Amino acid sequence: MKRALLACLMLLLLGGAAAAAQTAPHELDSIEQRVLPCSACHGAEGRATRDGYYPRIAGKPAGYLYNQLLNFRDNRRVNAQMTYLVQRQTDAYLMEIAQHFSEQDLPYPPAEPPRAVPAVLERGMTLVRAGDSARGLPACQACHGDRLTGVAPAVPGLVGLPYDYLAAQLGAWREHTRHAHQPDCMADIASRLSPEDLGAVAAWLAAQPMPADTHPATAFTAPPPMECGGLSAAARSAP
Amino acid sequence: MIRKIVAGLALVAVVAAGVVLWLGLRHDRDVAGSSPLVMNGADRIERGRYLAQLGDCRACHTVQGSADYAGGRLIPTPFGRFYSPNITPDDDTGIGRWSADDFWLALHEGRGRDGQLLYPVFPYTNYARMARDDSDALYAYLRTLPAVPQPSRAHDLAFPYRWRLMLVGWRALFFRPAVFVPRPEQTPAWNRGAYLVQGLTHCSACHEARNALGGTQARDNPAGGLVLDWYAPVLSASSEAGLQDWPEQHIVDLLASGKSPRASAMGPMAEVVYESLQHASADDLQAMAVYLKSVPLTEKPEPEKALPRVLDQDLPRALASGGKLYAEHCAQCHGDDGKGRTPAGPALAGNRALTMDSAVNPIRIVLFGGYTPGTPGNPRPYGMPPFSSSLSKQEVADVLSYVRRSWGNQARAVTAVEVERNSGGPLW
């Protein structure tokens, strides 16, 4: 211990700026150090990078993040790099990682400029806000919260995400390459949407500014309109 | 005269064919042998469950996230794509109709229930060393699994390997079934370790170089090879993964927790630790350590030939570029001096995983990152970030050349072509 202190002192005295720049701002034996590999794609502290395919994970509900780690591990979601990183870790550790990112309360970047013409955005807004009862489609906010920032612990926010990511995920559900715990309500919903609908929903969501309160809601205001496996899985694994 | 020569040649051909057929198809008459594994209080099924875990059977016979032991996992090899079969007790698609004798023939002689010769991707070359009572215990355990009706997927093999008949010749050349015979001059722990390492835990299936025909060198002792897109280092060379001068406890730690003061388990070995060895008993781990320490040292493995080399005139540029990249991306965890920062970043100076001639594993670790397995001995592992999207192949080559040639490390430099060659395939 004494030697470590002395070493620190020497570093401070002699190392100067170069050493300071290389010293991580967190303890080595910390969760921040342990999740550094995540930053390679998801950005520092999980705040996302400019690459639109890797989502922000900071501030997403813990149960949702945990479910996704399990989904990658158990092949319900397909991304070789993600599966490779999480496949040999214990449930407890994956939960700790999910919890850590859920607690990151970081500012959001401004919304992307709209990627579609007004008529398409209008169509997207209608689907998000009202759904389409003729096709059995509930409104998005019925599950994802009035602010569309998600509902803790298991439902993710839909705003603050780039168009590329949203469109890719809705498409993956529709093409059966992304799955959730059964019953997979999102697969059901995506299968009832046309590719044009998916694009419109993604375009409208990506163009929305974040609301004043960016946090997930703490509870549903009304019972969710569909049964979703992710909700019960999160309830089972609540820490 | 000519007729005599032809007749003579024909006779030689017939005899040769006969010898090949006999060697390739003969049964092993010596099928006794009893297991050196002592497991007090375990009934046969419990023993079988433990043996299945130690043999890591589930890892190959299960698609992650699907039913255990129902098969279907892809095993890529230079000969084509193998898919593991369903070994649940389903009558039609699994081994429900197999008897204990059928099961024994599969493990001991590499034959299916219908007499079909099995491809040695199923390491019966190792399992042949197992004793009959352990085969029976394993069989008894597999009978208790839920039967999953799932037809096994056909292998997708290159010509001519798809002809199973070729296996007769292969077996004649490379396969001699024989149960493990304990060596009386050795300790019980050594014999137990040898029995496990050579047989059930099939270490040599990866850690022994395979020749162009996929035959291991048929020695007892493991020695290096490229498997599942990773390099399985040689266990008989101190320059690679030889454990001869390690304290026993460090070997036990590495096998049980995936982490030890001098090495960590990544890639396919991380899977072995996570799925299998973390569940091994303290006695069995210690026995394996005793045996692995006794593996005779062989000469340093031949450096891989036919690799593109970094030209002398390009080396200064590569090292300068690598040094810059290292300071920017690596030094924070591995230290300016390459000595690592305990406990997060392992030392790179003198790290054999980095300095052995093969650069395959370092390339894959830089490209795809990875965590050591999460185990009771190391429940919250640190990880290496993936750099495949932020560094070019040339940059990965440069930074690897730098770390392989700094702080006393003296490995050869790495080219972008070599990085490119090792950037594909399933991650493991």
Image (tube, coloured by chain):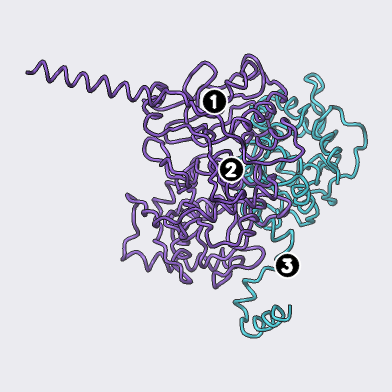
Q: What is the residue that sits farthest to the left in this orientation? A: B1
Mark 2 chain: B
Report if residue A120 is visible in the image: no
Please name whichever residue, B392 or B18, is drawn nearer the observer in this view of the structure: B18
Q: Quadrant of residue A208?
A: top right
Residue at left 24%, top 22%?
B13
Q: Are marks 1 and 3 on the same chain?
A: no
Please name whichever residue, B233 or B129, is drawn nearer the observer in this view of the structure: B129
Q: Which chain is purple?
A: B
Residue A67 left/right relative to B412: right
Q: What is the residue that sits farthest to the bottom in this orientation? A: A13
Mark 1, Cα crowd under 10 Å, few <14 / some 14-19 / many 20+, is: many
| Residue position for label 1 | B106
**Cα distance, mark 3 to mark 2?**
41 Å
Q: Disc 2, disc 1: CB below 8 Å?
A: no
Residue at left 41%, top 29%?
B171
- As drawn, the label of residue B149 is none
Q: Type of residue at label 3?
A: Glu
Residue A229 left/right relative to B359: right
Q: Type of residue at label 1?
A: Ala
Q: Position of residue A168 (x, y in %)?
A: 64, 36
Quarter of the image for the N terminus of chain A: give it: bottom right
Q: Position of residue B365 (x, y in %)?
A: 54, 53
Q: Which chain is cyan?
A: A
| Residue position for label 3 | A27
Residue B191 left/right relative to A136: left
Residue at left 46%, top 45%?
B208
Please name whichever residue, A127 or B117, is drawn nearer the observer in this view of the structure: B117
- As drawn, the label of residue B196 is 2
Q: Position of residue B258 (x, y in %)?
A: 64, 52
Mark 3 chain: A
Q: Are marks 3 and 2 on the same chain?
A: no
